[in-house]
Image (cartoon, grey):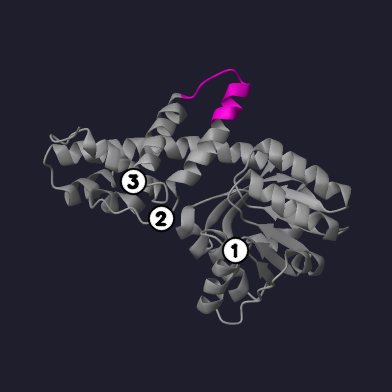
Amino acid sequence: MKTGIIGLGAMGAPMALNLYRASLLHAAWNRTPGRAAALAREAPGLPLVTQAQALVRECEVVLISVADDEALTQVMERMQPHLGPGKVVVDTSTVSAETACAVATRVAAVGSAFLDAPVSGGVEGARNGSLVMMVGGDAQALERVRPVLSVIASHIAYMGPVGSGQGTKAVDQVMVAGINQAVAESLAFAQALGLPMGRVLEVVSAGAAANWFLSNRGARMVRQQYPAGFKVALHRKDLNICKQMAAALDVQLPTVEMTLIHYKRLLNAGLGNEDISALYHLKKSMFDKDRA
């Protein structure tokens, strides 16, 4: 099954590499040529193309990994004239359910199938092929492409019609925000108490407070190192989607509202491209005696 991928950013690039190593990648394309060139240096022989149209025409499965709703809409404008019966478009981006449904309608109009399939697991999961994928759309289309998706995701869950994948991802993002808040705040508290942070991390990681974020981000947080895994700016974008979805239900989600305020401060401090664990920077400042 010829597979192409559009979008070679922090998540798309490792997905492309995993597909390439599994001999499933027929073509890859990125809107910014520089990123494509960098990936080609990492993997000589990677089948890069210079036009998205060629990729869409030649591939039966088209994966998309872009940053936001606008980027997805722009990519779809390029793709739609070259889609046709039998093709399956799988969008792994995080966008609004409304955008996913609008794109699905355009894809269906030319006889192709569309799956909204956002992922969770961060850059590490993308590199290891161990992402969790939550899928909305036609169940039979999912089964057709499952062998391809299994190369990039270790857990693929069918959630219902188009939009269900993005709805599930919104739930995931709210939970990530809460975990980030809890871990950053508690570790800043522990450090202010003068506790041995290495032992604190070891102990709490073995008890009821154990979680992926603590294990994979905790040690770097206390060293105030935030190498990009899931950028603050991107999570902020996702939480704004969650905020809009909650508003449609006439409610506000306190965790989302608080985290959006904190992320705005991080962006103002020039930390928008750092990992979301940079929230520790703000939490630590609560305990600094020389804080403004």
Could you tell me which secondary element the residue under label 1 belongs to?
loop
Crowdedness of circle 1 by 10 Å Cα count: few (<14), some, many (20+)?
A: few
Residue in the image at 72% along x and 61% along y:
62
Q: Which residues are magenta?
A: 243-253
Crowdedness of circle 3 by 10 Å Cα count: few (<14), some, many (20+)?
A: many
Marks 1 and 3, how far apart in space?
Answer: 27 Å
Amino acid on which the number 2 mark rests in the picture: Ala
Crowdedness of circle 2 by 10 Å Cα count: few (<14), some, many (20+)?
A: some
Comparing labels 2 and 1, the label whose residue is closer to the camera: 1
Q: Is residue 34 magenta?
A: no
**Nearer the observer, 127 or 274:** 274
Sequence-first tag of 2 and 1: 1
Image quarter of residue 39: bottom right
Residue in the image at 65% along x and 42% along y:
165
Instruction: Identify the disc placed on residue 278.
Output: 3
Q: Is residue 265 left or right of residue 91?
A: left
Instruction: Identify the disc placed on residue 32.
Output: 1
Q: Position of residue 22 (x, y in %)?
A: 62, 74
Marks 2 and 3, how far apart in space?
Answer: 10 Å
Could you tell me which secondary element the residue under label 3 belongs to?
helix
Instruction: Identify the disc placed on residue 228.
Output: 2
Marks 2 and 1, how far apart in space?
Answer: 19 Å
